[in-house]
Image: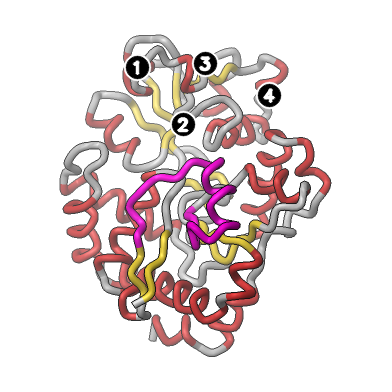
Amino acid sequence: MDHINFPYRSSSHLLLHHVIAKSGSWEKHGLDVNYDYFISSADAHADVPTGKVEFVSGNHISTYGARARGDQWVYLGQATNVANLSLVVRKDSEISGIPDLREKTLASGSEKNKHPNLNEWLYLKQRGLDVDKDEVTIVAKEDHQNKSTYDMILDGDVDAALMTPPNTQIAASLGLKVIDVESLPMILNTSISTSLTFVRDNPDLVQRFLKGTLEGIAFFMKNPEKSQKIIQDNYTRKGALSDDVVRQVYDNLTQTLEPTLYPTLEAISNVYQLGVRQDADAAKISPLALWDMHPLREIDDAGFIKDLYK
C-alpha cells in the first residue's frame, strides 16, 4: 500500500473526497490517501516540488503566474467545471436578480483577490457590472468584522451574496431568500494538481491515483443513498447536515461532477482570467500551459472510464 498526501485548498472538496475514500476506491488501487487536511497556497507551491506532498486538491489561481516564472505545476484532472450559483438576499429585499445589484454591495466569502472573491468579480463583470468602475461593491472577507456572510446580509451590512451549496441551504434555513441565477463555468473544487517532475518519475502512481478518483466519482454517481450517508457522517465542519441539506448538496454535485475528469475550455478560460487579475505574469503563458491530460487520456483510451458506467 502506497501512502499518498492529497490535502485540499478548501474544505468543500471533502464532500466528494469522503465518498471516494469511504467507498474504498483509492484503497482498491493500492493507495492509502491522507486527504482530510488543509494546505495553504504557499505551502502547496513549496511542498509539491519537494515530494512532501504528492497531489493537491485545488490551488487554481496562483499557479499561472508561478508557471510563468518557471514553476512546474500541472493539473491532471478536473472534477467540477461549473459553479451552480444562487443570489442570497434578505426576505424584504427588492433585489430579484443580478441586474439589481448595480450600486449595491455584495459580500464575499473570501479575501480580496482570492478564489472565490475573484469568481464574483468575473461573474459580475461578464454581466455588465464592473467592480473597477464602482458599478457594484464587493465586501471581502477581511472586512466582515468577524461576522458570517449570513449575518452580514441579515444585519444589513451588505445587500446580497453569491453562494453555492451547502451554503445556500443554510441561508434558506436562516430565513434568507435564495434566488437561482445563471451558473459560472469555472475550475473549482477538486482539481488533481502536482508537479511535472512527479508525473514523469511516477507514472504508475499517477495512473492509480487517477483511476481511484474516477472510480470514486462513479460510486458517487451510482450510489446516492450510500454517498449521502457518507457525507452526513463525515462532513461536519459546519455542523451536522440535515437529511434535506445533504440531499440538496448531493443533487448539486451530481449536476456538476465531470465523470471523465476532463476540464472544459470555458472553465479554463475563466480561471485563467482570475490568474491574470491576481498576477500580471500569468498573461505571459497560455491558459492551457498547466494542463497535462496525457495520463488521463491513456486511461480513457484503454476503456477504463467507459467500463465504470456500463
The answer to whether marks 4 and 2 mark residues whose Cβ atoms lie closer than 8 Å is no
Q: Which mark is residue 130?
A: 4
Of callouts 3 and 1, which one flags the residue occurring earlier in the amino acid sequence? 3
Q: Nearer the viewer, residue 65 or 229?
A: 65
Is label 1 or label 4 in front? 1
| Residue type highlighted by circle 1 | Lys
Q: Is residue 141 magenta?
A: no
Region rendered in magenta: 34-57
Q: Is residue 50 magenta?
A: yes
Q: CA distance from mark 2 to mark 1?
A: 16 Å
Label 3 belongs to which residue? 105
Tell me what residue is drawn at x 25 percent, y 24 percent. Answer: 175
**Secondary structure beneath label 2:** strand
Regarding residue 91, the answer to whether it shows in the image is: no
Residue 138's quadrant in the figure?
A: top right
Q: CA distance from mark 4 to mark 2?
A: 16 Å
Percent across and percent down for residue 4 are 41, 66
Of callouts 4 and 2, which one flags the residue occurring earlier in the amino acid sequence? 4
Label 2 belongs to which residue? 162
How many neighbours does mark 1 have within 10 angstroms: few (below 14), some (14-19), or many (20 or more)?
few
**Secondary structure beneath label 1:** loop
Label 1 belongs to which residue? 147
| Residue type highlighted by circle 3 | Thr
How many neighbours does mark 2 have within 10 angstroms: few (below 14), some (14-19), or many (20 or more)?
many
Tell me what residue is drawn at x 64 percent, y 74 percent. Answer: 200
Of callouts 4 and 3, which one flags the residue occurring earlier in the amino acid sequence? 3
Percent across and percent down for residue 92 are 34, 15
